[in-house]
Image (cartoon, rainbow, N blue to C red):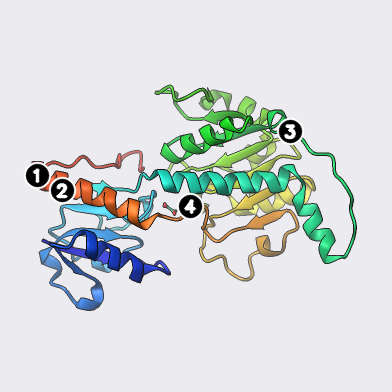
């Protein structure tokens, strides 16, 4: 069996070594090996260029090296091949740490001390809220969003969630559906967006959405940059001096040097680093799905092609 491995991660060598170790009986190729693409039956990828996708005529499964699959299904040559994506507890836990760290910067007003330190200014104690006094609204309650919600709820925050349709009851998080977006946003002190990149989520966080939020709220975007209208957000920040944001994902990544978010006082930027894909546990999962497929000849794609996630 021939497998193609492709990604642009900093630690791609480490990934390759681990994949070779786990899939020890298979032939693993990178594009530098100049493989016969027609012989490739499986692809393990992140941000595969379309000109390579086009050549993979006999691939049976594409494994995404992350939770997101937009990097595959948005390729013009992608042709409904089943996709297996990472659904990993370690990733969900790391994402929860990230979200909590950002909430604490806002909740404990640590951003004030950071600025004051630059000016050698002694600010003294600040009035801060307890966890139980803070309502956190999670937008996007898939595997990761639900995990983050439960994590925060266990820390005593009031956690609520927003979904278009409440088709499943998950945990004790109170769900608000489409018609209740106004209410959901008006009571959330912190909004955490973990939305995927789909046609329906494009610019979902826009002027209207932002205006429904509390004037001194905190927005965390760890989903996809496509879901946020950056111009609307800049304008909103201009008008609402007590509004804060933490952004991990952007329309263009890496974030261009001339982007205004870099230097904005109320913006925290992290470089698409909220949830690292855990090499070992992800490869174990892929290997399990691969073995099941080899045994049964069946694979259920993790992706609903109409929904786009
Ligand atoms: C992912 C990501 O989808 O890191 O896993 O963005």
What residue is drawn where x is 26% and y is 62%?
A: 19
- Residue 128 sits in quarter: top right
Q: Is residue 202 visible?
A: no
Instruction: Determine the secondary structure under disc 4.
Output: loop
Is the residue 203 above or below the residue 10 in the image? above
Q: What residue is disc 1 on? A: 295
Mark 1 vs mark 4, CA separation in Å:
32 Å
Mark 2 touches mark 1? (CB < 8 Å): yes
Q: Nearer the viewer, residue 60 or 127?
A: 127
Relative placement, left or right, of 113 versus 263 is: right
- Name the residue tied to disc 2: 291
Q: CA distance from mark 3 to mark 2?
A: 48 Å
Can residue 295 be seen at all in this image of the molecule? yes
Name the residue tied to disc 4.
Answer: 275
Q: Are marks 1 and 4 in contact (CB under 8 Å)?
A: no
- 216 lies above or below 253: above
Kindly indicate whether the residue at mark 2 contacts the one at mark 3 (C-beta within 8 angstroms): no
Q: Classify mark 1: helix, strand or loop.
A: helix
Residue 105 in the image: x percent, y percent? 70, 48
Q: Name the residue that disc number 3 marks.
A: 130
Instruction: Work out whether mark 1 precedes mark 4 in sequence or the reverse, and give the earlier one.
Output: 4
Q: Nearer the viewer, mark 3 or mark 4?
A: 3
Q: Against 152, is 34 above or below?
A: below
Specify few, some or many for label 4: CA neighbours under 10 Å numbering under 14, 14-19, or 20 or more: many
Label located before the other in sequence (2 or 4): 4
Are the residues at dot 2 and dot 4 in contact (C-beta closer than 8 Å)? Answer: no
Question: Quadrant of residue 305 in the image?
Answer: top left
Q: Position of residue 208 (x, y in %)?
A: 63, 38
Separation (CA) of disc 2 from disc 1:
6 Å
């Amino acid at each position: 069996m021939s497998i193609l491995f492709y990604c642009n991660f900093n630690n791609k060598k480490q990934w390759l070594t681990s994949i070779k170790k786990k899939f020890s009986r298979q032939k693993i190729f990178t594009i530098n090996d100049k493989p016969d693409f027609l012989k490739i039956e499986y692809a393990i990828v992140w941000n595969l260029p379309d000109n390579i996708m086009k050549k993979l005529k006999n691939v049976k499964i594409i494994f995404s090296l992350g939770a997101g699959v937009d990097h595959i299904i948005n390729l013009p040559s992608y042709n409904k091949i089943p996709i297996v994506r990472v659904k990993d507890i370690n990733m969900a836990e790391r994402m929860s740490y990230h979200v909590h760290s950002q909430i604490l910067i806002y909740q404990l007003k640590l951003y004030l001390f950071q600025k004051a330190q630059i000016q050698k200014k002694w600010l003294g104690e600040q009035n801060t809220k307890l966890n139980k006094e803070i309502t956190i609204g999670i937008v996007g309650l898939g595997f990761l969003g639900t995990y983050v919600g439960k994590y925060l709820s266990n820390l005593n925050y009031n956690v609520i969630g927003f979904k278009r349709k409440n088709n499943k009851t998950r945990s004790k998080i109170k769900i608000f559906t489409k018609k209740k977006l106004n209410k959901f946003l008006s009571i959330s002190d912190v909004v955490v967006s973990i939305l995927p990149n789909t046609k329906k989520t494009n610019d979902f966080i826009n002027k209207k959405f932002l205006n429904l939020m509390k004037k001194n709220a905190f927005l965390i975007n760890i989903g996809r940059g496509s879901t946020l209208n950056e111009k609307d957000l800049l304008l909103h920040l201009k008008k609402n001096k007590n509004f804060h944001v933490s952004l991990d994902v952007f329309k263009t990544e890496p974030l261009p040097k001339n982007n205004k978010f870099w230097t904005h006082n109320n913006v925290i930027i992290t470089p698409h680093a909220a949830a690292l894909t855990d090499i070992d546990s992800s490869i174990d999962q892929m290997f399990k799905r691969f073995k099941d497929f080899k045994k049964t000849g069946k694979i259920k794609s993790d992706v609903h092609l109409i929904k786009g996630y």
